[in-house]
Amino acid sequence: MSAASYTSDEMMTISAARMLRNRQICFVGIGLPSTAANLARLTHAPDVVLIYESGPIGAKPAVLPLSIGDGDLAETADTVVSTPEIFRYWLQGGRIDVGFLGAAQLDRFANINTTVIGDYRKPSIRLPGAGGAPEISSSAKEVLIIAKQSERTFVDKLDFITSAGFLSGGDARKRAGIPGRGPTAVITDLCILRPDPKTFELTVTSIHPGITRELLKERTGWPLRFAVACEETPAPSSCELDVLRDLHRRTCLVHENGEGAHA
Amino acid sequence: MAQWSTLSEAVASLVHDGDSVALEGFTHLIPFAAGHEIIRQRRRRLSLIRMTPDVIYDQLIGAGCAAKLTFSWGGNPGVGSLHRFRDAVEHDWPAPLELQERSHSDLANAYVAGAANLPFAVLRGYAGSDLARTGSHIRTIQCPFTGEELAATPCVRPEVAIIHAQKADRKGNVFLWGILGVQKEAVLAAKHSIVTVEEYAESLDAPPNACVLPHWVVSAVCLVPRGATPSYAHGYYGRDNAFYKRWDAISRDRSTFESWLKEHVLDTEDFAEYLKVLAETGRQVAPA
């Protein structure tokens, strides 16, 4: 694939990576957030500090971890602490600038569901559950969410709020006494959404190249709003694409050789 | 006081039907061998506790060992759903599974409270989350000094904690390193503990601030090389990522799962024999 062409997943990861600033302290979820955070570290933010809930602080993995506690994270970290310490001293202690999360489902106020589809007591689909997300979304100074955009993911009403975004909107988050600012951007494979300054409803502020407003509306379960100053997301640079593809290539090599890299 | 014993003896004497049992290990050092032994000895109605119930709890739940699960994230890391866990929650198969659901921060704090002999833990968490409304163990308390509203969550005090570690010495002092999760807290919160280890060592050679569990807080130490596979043991072997992927297909269907469990766990003598059988069946499914 030439640098000029790219996939929507690459566009998503690259636009998410751009959100992280150098030297920020970032609490990283596994999967898409971890890919984006490591891409940021390997491009414009070499001194970003990546913290994983399994205990590594300042992890610099050579390849993407498959699990939240891969040995490579521990070996490349500045220090490794216990799980209680990560949550007590580092997250609740107010030391995290950015919490980087994925989402199974989210609503227009960036509340996240990773618990159940259907009734809690008798769910039609049981999802994995909370993990670290409720406290990441409340204690981190701000939160970035990365998720592929579809009607199934971007829903009108959540069956369960696992992690609070802006709750019912307006000043609801503040009234609930939640310390962090909450989600400042949701990055998808189609666009970037940010909370409206007053209503805190997610509105489209940047559309990825080649994506139409009609497609965005189709892939969203609520009547989608667009910011007045809605921009086009800059396409990935060849440098961003090279680094991301190389990272994926190295990751595949290591993980497909059977055992992890840290034996 | 730690006793060196076989894993089969340790499980037989310390894990009883109806007990609350925590097998801990955060992606790293997951005590798979001990989980298999509990299945082999057909323990029932266990109240299982674990931050990240993954493949080993999928196996215990599917095998019918569990009546209750206290947890904070239940998935197959890097792969997807736990099908046996979901089948139990969604369809009561093979038995209904009562859930006590927490966040990671809650459960980690609850182990700390248990280890500290406190009845509950306090955390600044759950604000705005429906988890605080699931019928739930979570309460709100007011700070007596500042008036701030905080979440209170009951401590966790398992009957038995089970962990895997790298080394133990003659007396049963245990040394573990790498990603430590909540293993130390789980052992200190529990009435009894079983530690499986990779290696017996004449001397631990642990530096002063290393994570060492003194022999007198451990009930039983068992030598089980590779006892954490398919998870990994830092410095010994890597994570068997291929097995985690294979588990998805094995566990999706009840009868496939049951025949896998019979062949690999119920019909094997111990973990060493399990590893032999697994190596053979692994070769059969591996692409030519």
Image (cartoon, coloured by chain):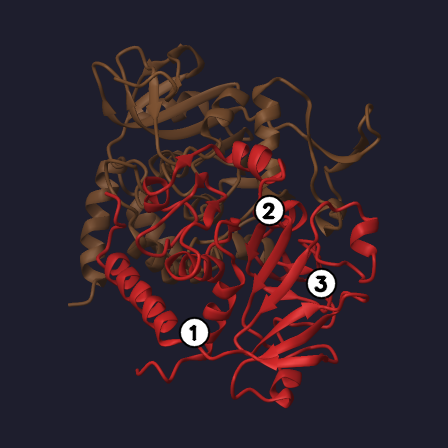
Identify the chain drawn in red: A
Task: Estimate the x, y position of residue B57 in percent, counting from the top left.
Answer: 46, 44
Q: Which residue is mark 1?
A: A10
Q: Callout 1: helix, strand or loop?
A: helix
For chain B, give the colour.
brown
Q: Callout 3: helix, strand or loop?
A: loop
Q: Which residue is mark 3?
A: A159
What is the three-letter code of the residue carrying label 2? Leu
Q: How many numbered discs, if any?
A: 3
What is the three-letter code of the residue carrying label 3? Asp
Work out whether residue A254 can be spotted: yes
Name the residue located 50 percent from the left edge and 43 percent from the top edge: A53
Task: Estimate the x, y position of residue A6 in percent, counting from the top left.
Answer: 39, 81
Gap in angstroms between the C-alphas marked 3 and 2: 21 Å
Name the residue located 36 percent from the left edge and 40 percent from the top edge: A74
> A238 above or below A100?
below
Q: Which chain letter matches label 1?
A: A
Asked if badge 1 and badge 3 are on a common chain, one would say yes
Task: Estimate the x, y position of residue B257 in percent, counting from the top left.
Answer: 39, 56
Q: Which chain letter matches label 3?
A: A
Camera-nearest residue between B182 and B50 = B182
